[in-house]
Structures are given as structure tokens and as C-alpha cells.
């Protein structure tokens, strides 16, 4: 299985820029997607194919990367962005990162 | 509006079976592959199984192969997950999700399955 490694948690202030990283144990090309999950809710697709913004998602969210290193950026961060963010690869059997919990100061 | 509504969860004893359903609406169900994804309490997301748009192909994570069966009824716009020989480690919230291209663009609200004696 392709292992995806994310930093466990981040804390930022509203209005700041935050980058959430995801590293794959092998190249997944650009077959990487990002989801947001708030407590008690289902995951929500934010970014697909590494850099494509899902319809209806604010342009404050962006994604980049290819191969093994990927980044989700939120700029500027808003209070409503408090959530856990997961990366997911679809190069082979789908796997998710363990999630990065974003908290606001 | 795309809607996915799971049902069929609850408490079940180890070794017993349970069948989950996911009723889809708001899109042409038989045009899309579908999947089940689970999340153990306080844990991350794990892919469980995928089924092709016509039901001809199915894929499973290793830990559920031989125990879980994904299926669909396109006439009823419904996805299923038959779970047999359940184990305590299968305790999780199970989400159905629509596959678009290589990503999952719509998710249900989830259904909880608790495996315990």
C-alpha cells in the first residue's frame, strides 16, 4: 500500500496562510486529492488531481505537487476552516493520510 | 441535488453479519462507480471497497476480502455492503461515496456499525 504521511496538527490565526503537507511513500503522479472533515460530518472534497479546485469550494483553498510531495494551502484562513484535512491517493488501491487537524488560535 | 443516504447500521455480535444500504438520488446512478469508506472512532479514513458503474468489477481492501461483498441495484439506485464474519476491528462509521474520475466527490452522512458482544 502507498503510505501517505501528514503532520498531525497545526494552529494558526485567522487571516494567516497555512500549508498542509502530504508525502507519499512512492510516486502517485498527480493522483492526489484533499478532503476536509469537520466533527460529526462526512468528508468534503476540496481539491482533486493535486491542484484542481472542486466546484463550490472557496478559492482560498489551493493545491500543488506531483510525484511524492503535495501541499494544500489555505489563504487566508477563516474560523470556519477548523477541521481535519486528509490527503488521499488514487494511483493504486486508495489510501488516506492520517489527517492534519487544523485549529485556530 | 446529489444525495447519498446510508442505512442498516447498529450493534452486532462478533462473527455475525450485517448489510448496509446506500440510497442514491439526484444523479444517474448507473453512470458512476461507487465506494464504501470507513472511519473507526476517533481515527482516520480507510477505503473498504469499490464497485464499477455496472457492477461487473469489484475491489476490496485486504482486511475485508472474503468477508465483505459490495453490490448494487441500478434499478433501485442503491448500493450495498454485505458484511459477514464481523470483527471488533470493523467497528466504524461507514460512508458511501460517489466516484467521479479518480476522486470521491459526494459522500453520505455515514452509518455507525458497532461490533461487540
Image (spheres, coloured by chain):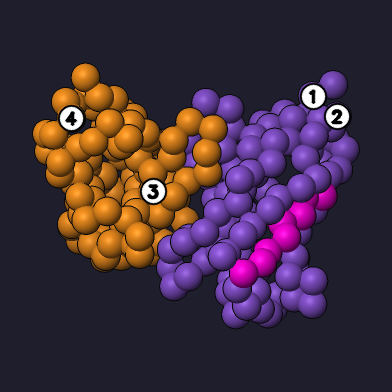
Chain colours: A orange, B purple
| Same-chain check, marks 3 and 4 | yes
| Same-chain check, marks 1 and 3 | no
> Residue, x 58% and y 27% (percent of image)?
B41
Q: How far apart are marks 3 and 4 (CA)?
A: 20 Å
Residue mark closest to the camera, 3 vs 2? 3
Return the chain for callout 2. B
Residues at discs 2 and 1 in contact (Cβ within 8 Å): yes
Identify the residue position indicated by label 4 in the image.
Answer: A14
Give whichever of A16, A29 is nearer the camera. Answer: A16
Q: Distance between the residues labelled 3 and 2?
A: 32 Å
Residues at discs 3 and 4 in contact (Cβ within 8 Å): no
Residue mark closest to the camera, 1 vs 4? 4
Magenta range? B19-26
* In this view, A49 is above or below B115: below
| Mark positioned earlier in the residue sequence (2 or 1) | 2
Q: Distance between the residues labelled 1 and 4?
A: 43 Å
Q: What element does badge 3 sit on?
A: strand
Residue A34 vs residue B65: left or right? left
Amino acid at each position: 500500500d502507498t503510505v501517505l504521511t501528514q503532520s498531525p496538527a497545526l494552529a494558526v490565526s485567522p487571516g494567516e496562510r497555512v500549508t498542509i503537507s502530504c508525502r507519499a511513500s512512492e510516486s502517485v503522479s498527480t493522483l492526489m486529492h484533499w478532503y476536509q472533515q469537520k466533527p460529526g460530518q462526512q468528508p468534503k472534497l476540496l481539491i482533486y488531481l493535486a491542484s484542481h479546485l472542486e466546484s463550490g469550494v472557496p478559492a482560498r483553498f489551493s493545491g500543488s505537487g506531483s510525484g511524492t510531495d503535495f501541499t494544500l494551502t489555505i489563504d487566508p484562513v477563516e474560523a470556519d476552516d477548523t477541521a481535519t484535512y486528509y490527503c488521499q491517493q488514487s494511483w493504486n488501491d486508495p489510501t488516506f493520510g492520517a489527517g492534519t487537524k487544523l485549529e485556530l488560535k | 441535488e446529489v444525495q447519498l443516504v446510508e442505512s442498516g447500521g447498529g450493534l452486532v455480535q462478533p462473527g455475525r453479519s450485517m448489510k448496509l444500504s446506500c440510497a442514491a438520488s439526484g444523479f444517474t446512478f448507473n453512470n458512476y462507480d461507487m465506494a464504501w469508506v470507513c472511519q473507526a472512532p476517533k481515527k482516520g479514513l480507510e477505503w473498504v471497497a469499490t464497485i464499477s458503474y455496472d457492477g461487473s468489477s469489484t475491489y476490496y481492501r485486504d482486511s475485508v476480502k472474503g468477508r465483505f461483498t459490495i453490490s448494487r441495484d441500478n434499478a433501485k439506485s442503491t448500493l450495498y455492503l454485505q458484511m459477514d464474519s464481523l470483527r471488533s476491528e470493523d467497528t466504524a462509521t461507514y460512508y458511501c461515496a460517489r466516484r467521479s474520475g479518480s476522486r470521491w466527490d459526494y459522500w453520505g452522512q455515514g452509518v455507525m456499525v458497532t461490533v461487540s458482544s
